[in-house]
Image (cartoon, rainbow, N blue to C red):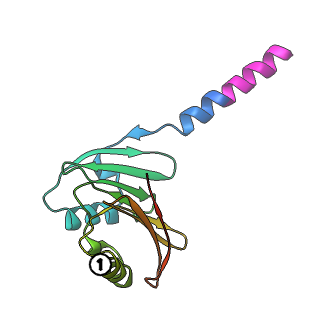
Amino acid sequence: MQKVVIRFILGLFLLSGIANADMVVPATALPKNAQSFISSTFKDAQVMYVEQDFDSFEVRLSNGVKIDFYRDGNWKEIESYNGINPALLPAQVATTLQSTFPNVTIIKVEKEWSGYEVKLANMLKVYINEAGQVIGQKSDD
């Protein structure tokens, strides 16, 4: 009886590992809106790598950009050490960033439940709500 229980538990661990495993998939596996976002926003870049897990996709482009998408195809995080165009953000958020931190490059943007977490090239993390108000900031050593 004890061996059966141990085998059952080991089987559950094995199945949970397989279910949560990341899989490399073709770019065509991305939802249509994610494919459209990539082709319209990063026109000169090629999709080099797509990894799918249970609830998201990770995409790497030939220009060094990394984008994480939710399963529905909406982006949740964009990272590029070459800089991210502020036009990808809502107008109020972009305006606040450009006026508060002029001439500082955006290198990472993550959608949060309360707005956006924006990492700047000067290693400052800025938290901005949907209305474009800075609600916090910290140095990211």
Residue 27 in view (yes/no)? yes
- Tell me the residue at 28%/66% (across/down): 37
Name the magenta segment's main secondary structure: helix
Read off the residue under disc 1.
98
Compared to 89, does 14 lie above or below?
above
- Across and down, in percent, residue 130 comes to 47, 80
Residue lying farthest to the right in this orientation:
1
**Residue 77 image point, x, y percent:** 40, 60
Residue 91, relative to residue 117: is it above or below?
below
**Residue found at x 32% / y 50%:** 59
Label 1: state its secondary structure: helix
Q: Tell whether 107 sits left or right of 129.
A: left
Horizontally, residue 41 falls left or right of residue 124, namely left
Q: Could you say which is closer to the camera, residue 43 or residue 19?
A: 43
Choose top left, top right, bottom left or bottom right for residue 114. Answer: bottom right
Residue nearest the observer in this picture, 59 or 35: 59
- Is 9 contained in the magenta span? yes
Rendering quarter of residue 17: top right
Q: Is 19 covered by the magenta stretch?
A: no
Q: Which residues are magenta?
A: 1-12
Q: Which one is in front, 133 or 44?
A: 133
Identify which amino acid the numbered label 1 is placed on: Gln
Taking 84 as reference, is 58 above or below it? above
